[in-house]
Image (spheres, rainbow, N blue to C red):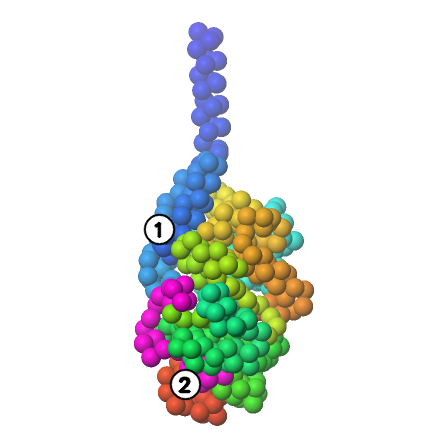
Amino acid sequence: MKMNVMGAVSGLALLVSTAAVAEPTAEVLHYWTSGGEAKSVAVLQEEFAANGGTWTDMPVAGGGGDAAGTALRARVLSGNAPTAAQIKGPAIQEWYEEGVLADISAVAEANNWAEVLPASIAGHMKCEGTWCAAPVNVHRVDWIWANAEVLAANGIDMPTTWDEFNAAAAKLQDAGIIPLAHGGQAWQDATVFEAVALGILGAEGYHKAFVDLDTDTLTSDSMKAVFDQMRTMRGYVDSNFSGRDWNLATAMVMNGEAAFQIMGDWAKGEFMAAGQVPGEDFLCISTPGEGFLYNVDSFAMFDVGGDDKKEGQALLAELVVGKNFQEVFNLNKGSIPARTDVALDAFDSCAHLSAADMAASNEGGSLLPSYAHGMALRGAQSGAITDVVTAHFNSDMSSDEAVEMLANAIANSL
């Protein structure tokens, strides 16, 4: 009888103990659905499971995250927010202002995020001083990619100024080669535009124009020079560019149909997936000028009930910024780790260049958010700029007209 009582007590103690420790659960809404991205998310799921968690995957394909954003809004409005969602830039602050984000400062402080993340990037992850999101990676936007064989055959070095780029492009045209592979989509026009703007305006001028929305900078002679260069660039694009997806433009560089592409380092993933070797088959260099334009993927954490979900949220945040996932995910994605203390031994030469430039730009105050990729401005303002950029690129609009339209568009969007 005594043993039975003791057994019952032990069983009860075990039951109480088990109940006190909630199993971490996480429902994660994201738009990483391509091959490399899906593979990267699978690594995170495996790590989550290895730490005793249960993961519910909510991938939403299409629209560069637009469809995922629509799905997320529907979930939140119905009072059924996911544990975490892939959100970036000012959109994090917009969700915070709606009072639906969780405070994950305890995880961030326990894992020293403030010490291992560049200050500019850490700033996007904070909501009025508290941590509310976890960064996954850093994509550099201002890259030139090139076909090594095409350049060598035509005696061309990678350009370090826009004048050198223009001279190379003219030489390539004379040889019957498309100088610039480009897809005629608004966001691709904006990607080229902000890279040109950084080079001509400089880091301080870029910040004034696309972060501060300073009218004097937006209407300056320097901004007119940006549009002048864009008009020149338009002449280097083939006539079939309209509507072309970015990865098809990358393929043009791979097969030697075109020499250059200006695109973020997700393009590198295409080259690598095709078995091409950086420095041999394709070349990389930052676009002319000082500075570094970044696009950071991140997970915002939503205010959820239940110890299991809160534990899942904390575990997810810790793993996302953990060294292992930061390395494995970015090797697949083409980006570099958000944290600066991850060993880069397994990364390629372009990633090493990106990491070195990010560190130097962070020190020099020229680590800048990409407006074209949703890091610098809210949707209304970034959309207003891109509308003008695309209208100019696809017409005979003068640079004087473009800067006037730009200033008006920004004023009307505020």
Q: Which residue is drawn at 33% across and 79% down?
A: 239
Q: Residue at x 53, y 86 (%)?
A: 225
Q: What element carries label 2?
A: helix
112 above or below 263? Answer: above
Pointer 1 local density, CA inside 10 Å: few below 14, some 14–19, many at least 20: some
Task: Identify which amino acid the numbered label 1 is placed on.
Answer: Met
| Residue 147 visible in the current orientation | yes
Q: Mark 2 points at which residue?
A: 392
Task: Identify which amino acid the numbered label 2 is placed on.
Answer: His
234 or 322, which lies in front? Answer: 234
- Which residue is farthest top? 1
Highlighted magenta segment, given as a residue range: 229-256
Residue 285's quadrant in the figure?
A: bottom right
Q: Mark 1 points at which residue?
A: 58
Is residue 265 shown left or right of residue 79?
right
How many numbered tags mark residues here? 2
228 or 33, which lies in front? Answer: 228
- The quadrant of the image that shows the N terminus is top left
Query: How far apart are the alpha carbons under marks 1 and 2?
Result: 39 Å
- Magenta stretch encompasses residue 85: no
Residue 70's quadrant in the figure?
A: bottom left
- Magenta stretch encompasses residue 254: yes
Q: What element carries label 1?
A: strand
88 or 330, which lies in front? Answer: 330
- Mark 1 vs mark 2, foreground winner is 2
Residue 220: assigned label = none
Residue 365 image point, x, y percent: 65, 69
Q: Residue at x 35, y 66 (%)?
A: 248
Q: Which residue is drawn at 46% across and 29% down?
A: 18
| Residue 410 visible in the current orientation | no
